[in-house]
Image: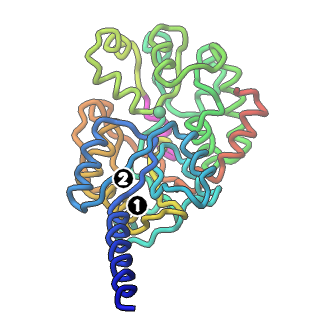
Amino acid sequence: MFLLARLIIAALGGLSVSAYAEENVLNLYSARHYQTDEALYADFTKQTGIRINRIEGKEDELLERIKNEGANSPADVFLTVDAARLAKAHELGLFAPVSSKVLDSRVPAHLRTEDWYAFSTRARVIVYNKASVRAEDVRNYEDLGNPKLKGKFCSRSGSHPYNLSLMASVIANQGEAKAEELARGMVANFARAPKGGDTDQIKAVAAGECGVAISNTYYLARMLRSTKSEDQKTMEKVGIVWPNQATTGTHINVSGGGMLRTAPHKAAAVKFLEYLASDSAQGYFADGNNEWPVVESVKVANPALDAMGKFKADKLPVKNLAMYQAKAQIIFDRVGFK
Ligand code: FE
């Protein structure tokens, strides 16, 4: 009997040690892969003693993976870009609500939902060829559908989340009819069938193949900071417009994340999300991809972003952006914006 008791105690002792070791780990599924993020994760481990196991992958693949792993998923936190993808994770029921005073006080209300948080923002701006298009003609997103720009508009695919989120914001701000009118006008103005990414559009605008395009700010900042002479020449030829400054403001998209419902390490997950909203993490997280922090008191000195100037951002809640994704896709399908 005595021996048995000792065996049980030994077994329990062993269990509690391994359980403790388990607790000091965070399994992070991330679609971010920037050099500066390394420093961020190292700093988190230094502050909390929690080691980070990182699984990196493409945004949609990671989402699929978590979905397929189901209840057995080791994932604690999912980080990705674009409100549409974060909303998809929410709709699939993958996220769990987090109760955190830190997150609620530091992340502005329009940049969080009940179960996921934005940690950085990027703007979707208009890029035009300074030789063939006048800035006055492309002040607003609506202008991109103006017949004046016939044969001049270039874009990446309409089904890409960045364009769906932009269209979702137009639906939210101006209604479906106006959004469809704009989408139809954009298609009528195409210089070529949609192809490539935002950087390809910037280059095509500079080369004169297109007169105007839309791009996320971090692609422009990347080119502005580039030391390659071809990139510098590209940026000399293009002008950048902050759209809709006199009305709703420039459309903002986000990079963000949340805790998974099946997270094995929930306490660590909350700690990590709170850490991402800290002053130092915000600077790293945003600036690593030439984005802006969501915490208003955090300032980042980024010469490329500073060079683009200040702007009025659309304060549309990220939740609403997600709400109109499906409608945005229906509109693009209807007008043939492939
Ligand atoms: Fe991107």
- Residue pictured at 46% horizontal, 58% vertical: 76
Q: What is the x, y in percent for residue 99?
A: 44, 72
- Residue pictured at 20% horizontal, 56% vertical: 46
Vertical order, 310 against 21 (above or below): above
Residue 84 in sight: no
Q: Residues within 10 Å of mark 1 (few under 14, many from 20)?
A: some
Instruction: Quote the CA–CA distance across marks 1 and 2.
Output: 7 Å
Q: Is mark 1 within 8 Å of ligand 1?
A: no
Q: Main secondary structure of the magenta part?
A: loop
Residue 197 in sight: yes
- Which numbered marker is on residue 108? 1
- Residue pictured at 56% horizontal, 34% vertical: 141
Q: What is the x, y in percent for residue 258?
A: 47, 58
Assess whether mark 2 and mark 1 are in contact (beta carbons under 8 angstroms): yes
Judging depth in this view, the residue of 180 and 278 nearest the camera is 278
Q: Is residue 280 magenta?
A: no
Which residue matches tag 2? 294
Say left or right for 204 vs 36: right
In terms of secondary structure, where does tag 2 sit?
Answer: loop
Judging depth in this view, the residue of 311 and 28 nearest the camera is 28
- Residue pictured at 41% horizontal, 33% vertical: 217
Q: What is the x, y in percent for residue 176?
A: 72, 45
Which residue extends farthest right? 334
Q: Which residues are magenta?
A: 241-249
